[in-house]
Image (cartoon, grey):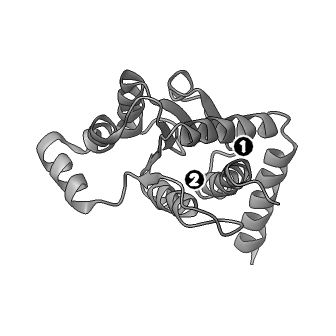
Amino acid sequence: MDFIADFLAESADALAAFRTDPATPGVLTAMADTITEALRAGRKLLIAGNGGSAADAQHIAGEFVSRLFFDRAPLPALALTVDSSVLTAVGNDYGFLNVFERQVLGLGQQGDVFLSISTSGTSPNILRALEAAGSRGLVSIGFTGSNNGPMAPLCRHLLRAPSAKTAVIQQIHITAAHIVCGLVERAMFPPP
């Protein structure tokens, strides 16, 4: 019972810190504006992460392509974590370090947005993909944890979840993703 109470308290504390951080509204709005601008220009959103963040990448892409808060046209978003043939071919031929970099280089176009997700902020394959995105003219944004990792200089906008615990960081990331997607939906398809 102590574990349950402690975990719920830690989660609630992180969400409260995220909610009251004066930087939160600005970074969420900036991310949504960046994605909206790209989508209006006929570009797409590419998303990548490892482990639970890979699942988050798929979840986020699904919200854009399907719907989140209301019925509307699909929006072009692609999780770079779902094609097992590409992941295993690149992993086998070039190494796991390159699984997202190769996809960014092959699928990304100038003006697309690359959302990188790394709870540690130090995932080597995410950092390589961010560098590739920069070289191709993609706009990079990112979700990470409270550490001061090397993602910041590679991202136009970086959301730092106020926790160092992976599970709690991921809870903040999916909350942030829902907010960003909701803002994009409202901007692309204004309610009557």
Q: Amino acid at mark 1?
A: Pro
Q: Position of residue 56 (x, y in %)?
A: 52, 58
> What residue is at 60 percent from the left and 58 percent from the top?
167
> What residue is at 47 percent from the left and 60 percent from the top?
58
Which quadrant of the figure has residue 174? bottom right
In the rendered picture of this protein, how many numbered marks are placed on residues? 2
Which quadrant of the figure has residue 23? top right
The quadrant in which the C terminus is found is: bottom right
Q: Amino acid at mark 2?
A: Thr
> What residue is at 36 percent from the left and 22 percent from the top?
135
Q: CA distance from mark 1 to mark 2?
A: 11 Å
Which of 159/133 is in front? 133
Circle 2 residue: 166
**How many residues crowd mark 1 within 10 Å: few (<14), some (14–19), many (20+)?**
many
Circle 1 residue: 162
Outermost residue, bottom side: 1
Label 1 secondary element: loop
Q: Position of residue 5 (x, y in %)?
A: 78, 71
Outermost residue, front side: 192
